[in-house]
Image: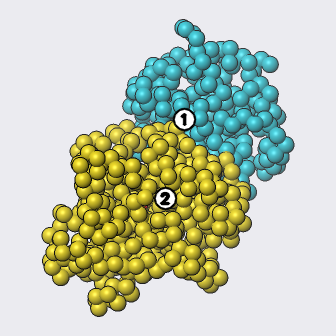
Chain colours: A yellow, B cyan
């Protein structure tokens, strides 16, 4: 349990709740209630039924034979891309909207980068009949257009955010401001394991369904109790936290988290927080962040809107600090190449985010009998624009 | 004696505190603005240290923070600009900003510099009282620097009392649950809230802030608390400056001589 949040809301030196007083009552309400709700039998039944019948879980663990052959090892793909709405994000939004309802909230807000969390939030709001407002950086509104239209069709209001460099960080700040201004009726469904305590712990617990399934699926598929490796991409860190969760205390499993290097970790155009960041405070939590010498948050860059964030969840920062998880990064180009490799070898078009995790397969020398699980956190429909451009540029 | 205490000892009501963002509209504006505010008769000044992601601020202050950073403002430079301010200005000066730049600068060094410069208090909205008490209280006390706490209409009585007991100088009464710059008028809910605080017999005086923008909201706030803080409305006016002179005196007059 040494990687779990302590009673003060910290993972080692990371975490906490650095929030203005105006947010305090809402954060306290959540902190005092979330474990009670998560443990409640009524909640658990409703959550697992919705995961099964609405989201389509369990998501398959697929033995990717041609990819395995290519890398001369045993690769299994955890197919979060097959979930309803196309990413792991729905696991979290189903859980949180059930919490919002139990807290008596009627209006839901969320931030989104790639639009996957926005779509997953708009979806559960439609399902539950709750008002939904999504904050999305203006740049992301442009580069993830299909998801904007999906949110609108689902009945959500999408607010383009024009501060900062108009991406995920700015959308998150704007969602927090909205919550300050609408504290009574509103619940903030945060999209990753970021933000003030208890959000990182709450979201990690809801995404933990991923590793819970991997545990029995790996046994069923390979006859072994655990994989040798687990690989996941990291924006805020929710699909990674979910994929790693039940293996955190099992040192037989090597955990690898992959950040977006953008144009390269030394290029100044990157979103690799662990590689280039330092401890600081962003969005209510003490964690690793990208900042300049004056403590101003620097603008990240990645081709992948979902990884384009200058922070990382405090749990992930702690897993890096305590050397439990090995962090690596992949550039835009490496991710694009990896996305095409998976597509051409397995007939699966991944989202740009998990393409970063796939890119690391090139860098690690696995043994032929190693069992390597890669979480495919989402599907590539939203990224067709980037893929078509790459296809044309490379004459693929 | 801390200048904030002196102010509240000598003046019981109609206290006007003005906020502006250092480095805005020009990199070197701060010193002139402070002197002009002082000459115009304000009682206290809050000097904003800009941050890239001001979570508690509305569009006007987001914009001034952003512009100030583009101009090149940082904490080190601000202290340099304020080096000689106490030769001419004797009213209380407060620094307001977010935690990350202060931590990066170094909390001990920051407090020491505040003391050396003649800063009387600090407002850091995202520094929770619990963390301040645990980690930073001794260093604040060492330099006789006051940490001003915010309370909002949703802060319950127990917590108000706790913050009141930790706080020195004055309580910053956020008038409604909102980010800065929302001037929606001084409605009955605000009056009720301030009356509730008046009835609590708190040890600290209180200044009302957020949404105070003109003579009317200022005088309303003064009816039910010791005074008020104006930020966005002033910064907005600074942004509209024409040619040479900043409209500081005009603005202050429009608030206090109405
Ligand atoms: C498909 C997909 N994967 C990964 C991420 C990154 O988020 P996290 O690190 O929280 O899993 C996103 C975020 O939008 C996403 O859409």
- Residue at 44% x, 46% y: name it: A143
For this rendering, which residue is in front, A303 or A145?
Answer: A145
Q: How many marks?
A: 2
- Residue at 52% x, 16% y: name it: B32
The N terminus of chain A lies in which quarter of the figure? bottom left
The tag on residue B62 is 1
Tell me if residue A388 comes above or below residue A86 in the rendering.
above
Q: Residues within 10 Å of mark 1 (few under 14, many from 20)?
A: many
Q: Residue B112: x and y, percent? A: 42, 37
Relative horizontal placement of residue B20, taking residue A128 as reference (left or right): left
Q: Residue A67: x and y, percent? A: 23, 71
- For disc 2, the marked residue is A116
Q: Secondary structure at mark 1?
A: helix
Where ligand 1 lies, by image quadrant? bottom left
The reply to whether callout 1 and callout 2 are in contact (CB within 8 Å) is no
Residue A395 appears anywhere in the view: yes
Q: Residue A18: x and y, percent? A: 52, 53
For this rendering, which residue is in front, B198 or A370?
Answer: A370
Q: Residue A290: x and y, percent? A: 36, 47
Residue A196 appears anywhere in the view: no
The tag on residue B208 is none
Whether the residue under disc 2 has CB within 8 Å of ligand 1: yes
- Residue at 25% x, 68% y: name it: A345
Q: Residues within 10 Å of mark 2 (few under 14, many from 20)?
A: many
Tell me if residue B59 comes above or below residue A215 in the rendering.
above
Label 2 marks which chain's residue? A
- Residue at 63% x, 42% y: name it: B179
Tell me if residue A315 comes above or below residue A312 in the rendering.
below
Label 1 and label 2: CA atoms lie apart by 27 Å
For this rendering, which residue is in front, A388 or B72?
Answer: A388
For this rendering, which residue is in front, B239 or A100?
Answer: A100
Q: Secondary structure at mark 2?
A: helix
């Amino acid at each position: 349990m040494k990687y779990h949040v302590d009673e003060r809301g910290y993972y080692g030196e990371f975490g906490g709740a650095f929030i203005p007083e105006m947010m305090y009552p809402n954060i306290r309400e959540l902190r005092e209630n979330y474990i009670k709700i998560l443990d409640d039998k009524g909640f658990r039944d409703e959550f697992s039924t919705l995961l099964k019948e609405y989201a389509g879980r369990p998501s398959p663990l697929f033995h990717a034979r041609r990819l395995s052959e290519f890398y001369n090892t045993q690769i299994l793909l955890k197919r979060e891309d097959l979930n309803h709405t196309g990413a792991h994000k729905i696991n979290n939004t189903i859980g949180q909207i059930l919490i919002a309802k139990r807290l008596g909230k009627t209006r839901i807000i969320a931030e989104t980068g790639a639009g996957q969390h926005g779509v997953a939030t708009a979806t559960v709001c439609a399902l539950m009949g709750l008002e939904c407002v999504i904050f999305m950086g203006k740049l992301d509104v442009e580069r993830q257009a299909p998801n904007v239209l999906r949110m609108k069709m689902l009945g959500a209001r999408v607010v383009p955010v024009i501060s900062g460099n108009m991406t995920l960080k700015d959308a998150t700040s704007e969602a927090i401001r909205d919550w300050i201004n609408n504290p009574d009726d509103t619940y903030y469904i945060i999209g990753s394991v970021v933000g003030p305590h208890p959000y990182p712990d709450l979201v990690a617990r809801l995404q933990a369904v991923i590793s819970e399934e991997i545990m029995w699926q790996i046994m069923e598929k390979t006859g072994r109790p655990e994989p040798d490796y687990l690989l996941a991409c990291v924006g805020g860190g929710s699909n990674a936290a979910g994929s790693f969760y039940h293996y955190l205390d099992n040192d037989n499993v090597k955990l690898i988290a992959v950040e977006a290097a953008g144009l390269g970790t030394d290029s100044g155009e990157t979103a690799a927080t662990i590689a280039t960041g330092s401890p600081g405070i962003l969005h209510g939590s003490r964690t690793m962040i990208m900042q300049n010498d004056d403590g101003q948050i620097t603008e990240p860059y990645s081709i992948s809107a979902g990884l384009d964030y200058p922070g990382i969840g405090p749990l992930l920062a702690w897993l890096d600090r305590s050397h439990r998880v090995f962090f690596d990064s992949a550039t835009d180009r490496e991710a694009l190449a990896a996305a095409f490799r998976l597509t051409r070898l397995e007939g699966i078009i991944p989202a740009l985010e998990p393409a970063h995790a796939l890119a690391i397969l090139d860098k690690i020398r696995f043994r032929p009998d190693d069992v390597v699980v890669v979480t495919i956190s989402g599907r590539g429909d939203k990224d067709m624009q980037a893929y078509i451009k790459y296809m044309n540029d490379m004459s693929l | 004696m801390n200048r904030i205490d002196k102010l509240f000892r000598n003046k019981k009501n109609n206290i006007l505190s003005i906020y502006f963002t250092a480095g805005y509209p020009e990199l070197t504006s701060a010193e002139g603005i402070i002197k002009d505010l002082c000459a115009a008769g304000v009682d206290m000044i809050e000097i904003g240290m800009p941050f890239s992601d001001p979570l508690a601020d509305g569009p006007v202050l987001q914009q001034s923070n952003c512009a100030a950073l583009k101009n090149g403002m940082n904490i080190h430079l601000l202290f340099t600009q304020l080096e000689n301010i106490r030769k001419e200005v004797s009213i209380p000066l407060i620094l307001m900003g977010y935690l990350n730049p202060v931590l990066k600068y170094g909390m001990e060094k920051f407090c020491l510099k505040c003391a050396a410069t003649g800063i009387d208090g600090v407002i850091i909205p995202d520094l929770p009282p619990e963390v301040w008490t645990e980690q930073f209280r001794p260093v604040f006390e060492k330099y006789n620097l006051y940490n001003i706490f915010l309370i909002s209409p949703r802060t319950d009585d127990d917590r108000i009392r706790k913050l009141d007991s930790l706080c020195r100088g004055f309580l910053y009464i956020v008038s409604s649950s909102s980010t800065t710059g929302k001037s929606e008028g001084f409605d009955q809910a605000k009056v009720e809230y301030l009356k509730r605080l008046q009835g609590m017999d708190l040890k600290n005086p209180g200044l009302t802030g957020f949404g105070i923008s003109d003579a009317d909201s200022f005088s309303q706030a003064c009816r039910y608390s010791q005074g008020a803080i104006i930020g966005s409305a002033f910064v907005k006016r600074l942004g509209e400056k024409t040619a040479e002179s900043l409209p500081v005196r005009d603005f202050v007059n429009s608030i206090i001589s109405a």
